[in-house]
């Protein structure tokens, strides 16, 4: 219906266009008759055109209109799909960001745990080495002390033996023998 | 002293013979002299061990030695016998075994007493008495001088040692000084 009105409007516009020059040329009776003649011719021409070509033009315009509507629908659908994909991608991106954050947090936690473990191991090892060094030092000091004491004891005994050999008199020997006999008598 | 089988066998034989003749004390003293001569002579010890000397050579030398020592026939024959049997190197051990058996037979025990200077008679008698009391046997003291004990007395009797020497006391002191608790 809309197309019909458009076609008629166009026809009338064309008719006026054809008659307008004649009217503009002025002239009395002769001018108007030519104009009417041309108008009739134009109307006939318009009618012919409308009669034979109008449906095809209308069909073409309708087809074009439907094609445009389909294109719009398709574009709308594609837009919706793209929007959905965009939303999904944005959701995936958001999820990925969350996962990346979680992964980073895990890595950070593991790193901290590993760092703590290494620190604890290093501390324990340092304590063990320190204890071992202290034990070795104590042992070495004790060994040296014992050796020095033994050497001092040995020197003291040797000095005593030397002094006794030099200074023991026959009277001392007899006294030692008597003391020995007394001890034996006490045991018997 | 633990005697070897050889020393026991020969010492038992000569002791039995000497006891029969009631000469075991004298034979003991003679054997001591023979053993002392061998102990003090490197040449005689070499004679008893060196195979380049024949039995005849050894017997000739030992016979001359025994003649000079003027020992009794029992001692002479016994020493010649062990020379012939190649046991002369065991003379000291045989004599010790002889004394051990003679002492056991007589109810005696020998005590080896080590001193720096010989004990006076009074102290020796006291020691003999106390040892007789401890062992229940008649004790024969054998004193030997050894300056290394520094002072005091060491007595070995019946397998026991009573060490009252200064050396032992110094050793005890040395041990205490060496011990960690000292």
Image (cartoon, grey):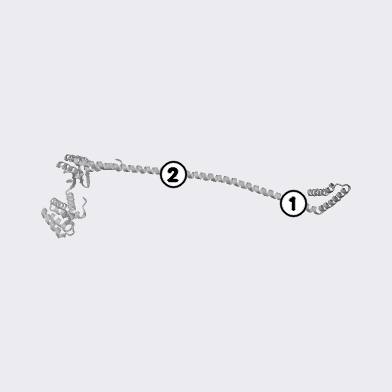
Q: Which chain letter matches label 1?
A: A
Give B106 or A43, whichever is nearer the viewer.
A43
Q: Nearer the viewer, residue A32 or A177?
A: A32
| Residue at the spot 31% in from the left edge and 43% down from the top edge | A144
Mark 1 near mark 2, Cβ–Cβ under 8 Å? no
- Quadrant where the C terminus of chain A sits is top left
Q: Nearer the viewer, residue A23 or A67?
A: A23
Element at badge 1?
helix
Give neighbour class at mark 1: few <14, some 14-19, many 20+ (Cα, 10 Å).
Answer: few
Instruction: Residue A119: name its quadrant.
Output: top left
Pointer 2 residue: A122
Rendered image: mark on residue A151: none
Residue receiving disc 1: A64
Task: Please state which of residues A141 and A21 is positioned toward the viewer in this rendering.
Answer: A21
Residue at 55%, 45% in the rendered image: A102
Q: Position of residue A31 (x, y in %)?
A: 87, 48
Provide the secondary structure element on which disc 2 rests.
helix
Q: Residue A112: x and y, percent?
A: 49, 43
Question: In this orientation, does residue A148 appear?
Answer: yes
Q: Answer yes or no: are tags 1 and 2 on the same subunit.
A: yes
Instruction: Between label 1 and label 2, give the one nearer the viewer.
Output: 1
Between discs 1 and 2, the one toward the N terminus: 1
**What is the distance, in whole Å, between disc 1 and disc 2 at their CAs?**
83 Å
Please, which chain is the residue tagged with disc 2 on?
A
Place of residue A129 in the rendered image (x, y in percent of width and height, measured from the top left): 40, 44
Neighbours of disc 2 within 10 Å: few (<14), some (14-19), many (20+): few
Residue B121: x %, y % from top left: 14, 42
């Amino acid at each position: 219906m809309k197309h019909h009105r458009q076609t008629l409007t166009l026809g009338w516009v064309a008719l006026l266009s054809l008659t307008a020059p004649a009217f503009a040329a002025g002239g009395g009776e002769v001018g108007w008759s030519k104009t009417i003649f041309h108008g009739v011719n134009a109307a006939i021409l318009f009618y012919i055109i409308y009669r034979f070509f109008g449906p095809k033009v209308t069909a073409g315009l309708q087809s074009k209109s439907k094609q445009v509507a389909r294109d719009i629908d398709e574009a709308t659908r594609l837009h919706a799909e793209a929007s959905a994909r965009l939303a999904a991608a944005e959701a995936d991106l958001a999820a990925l960001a969350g996962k990346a954050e979680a992964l980073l947090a895990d890595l950070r936690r593991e790193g901290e745990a590993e760092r703590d473990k290494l620190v604890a191991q290093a501390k324990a090892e340092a304590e063990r080495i320190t204890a071992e060094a202290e034990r070795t030092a104590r042992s070495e000091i004790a060994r040296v002390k014992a050796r020095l004491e033994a050497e001092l004891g040995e020197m003291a005994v040797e000095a005593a033996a030397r002094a006794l050999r030099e200074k023991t008199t026959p009277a001392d020997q007899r006294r030692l023998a008597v003391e020995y006999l007394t001890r034996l008598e006490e045991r018997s | 002293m633990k005697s070897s089988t050889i020393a026991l066998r020969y010492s038992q034989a000569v002791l039995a013979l000497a006891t029969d003749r009631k000469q075991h004390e004298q034979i003991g003293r003679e054997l001591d002299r023979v053993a002392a001569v061998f102990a003090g002579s490197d040449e005689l010890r070499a004679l008893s061990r060196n195979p380049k000397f024949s039995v005849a050579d050894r017997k000739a030398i030992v016979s001359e030695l025994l003649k000079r020592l003027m020992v009794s026939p029992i001692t002479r024959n016994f020493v010649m016998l062990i020379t012939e049997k190649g046991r002369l190197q065991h003379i000291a051990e045989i004599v010790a075994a002889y004394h051990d058996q003679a002492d056991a037979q007589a109810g005696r025990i020998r005590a080896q007493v080590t001193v720096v200077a010989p004990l006076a008679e009074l102290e020796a008698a006291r020691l003999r008495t106390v040892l007789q009391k401890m062992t229940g046997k008649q004790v024969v003291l054998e004193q030997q001088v050894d300056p290394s004990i520094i002072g005091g007395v060491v007595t070995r009797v019946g397998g026991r040692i009573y060490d009252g020497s200064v050396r032992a006391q110094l050793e005890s002191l040395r041990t205490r000084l060496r011990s960690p608790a000292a």
